Amino acid sequence: MSKNKKLKIQTPKAVLQPKKFQEKFFSLDFSCLTDDVRYNFYDMRKNGNIDFKSLRDFFNKLEKISLLSIAQISQLDRKNGFELLNRNNFKVKSIFSKIDKKYPFTKDMAYHVFRFGAQEHRIICKQCEKEGYDTVLFVLAIDWDLSTYRH
């Protein structure tokens, strides 16, 4: 009589797949937008009337920031509407009051400046430095008249 041998079936070990690179995109946070009326939505008026062209340009820039990955934004240059500036470049310190209270950042870190409206206006932002929240971009000010920093 022959004995039937049972075959051991080994389950294959899971093959570790390398993580696919996922592009990261900024989320815009307006909770730190300055109360200084010269650098928020209040001052987008010209002669008492809302400047709809500048407002449209502002929202177009926000859309572009939202659609580009962080890596793509970092590749933009000054002529294409993006630059990084140190805090000591800014003349107006009131734009930092809210973010300094809520999130004490290292003051020598760079601030994101996005140009819009034929480069006549600026959106000044700060990338969150807290681990896991590095895709949050705090909007600090909207510079309607190029007065926040030295040019």
Image (tube, helix red, strand yellow):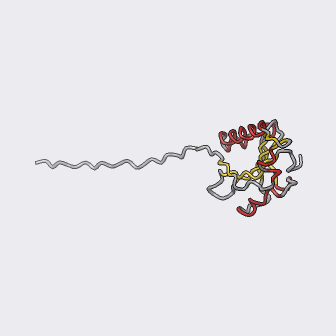
Above or below, 90 relative to 45: below
Q: Is residue 120 left or right of residue 33?
A: right
Residue, x 85% and y 55% (percent of image)?
92
Position in image of residue 98 (x %, y %)? 75, 60
| The one of 32 and 12 positioned closer to us in this rendering | 32
> Looking at this rendering, what residue extends furthest in the left direction?
1
| The one of 134 and 90 positioned closer to us in this rendering | 90
| The one of 17 and 35 positioned closer to us in this rendering | 35
Residue, x 45% and y 47% (percent of image)?
15
Position in image of residue 140 (x %, y %)? 75, 53
Q: Quadrant of residue 60?
A: top right
Position in image of residue 66 (x %, y %)? 66, 42
Residue, x 64% and y 58% (percent of image)?
131
The number of numbered badges drawn on the structure is 0
Q: Is residue 66 visible?
A: yes
> Looking at this rendering, what residue extends furthest in the front direction?
48
Residue, x 67% and y 49% (percent of image)?
28
| The one of 46 and 89 positioned closer to us in this rendering | 46
Q: Is residue 77 visible?
A: no
Above or below, 55 relative to 149: above
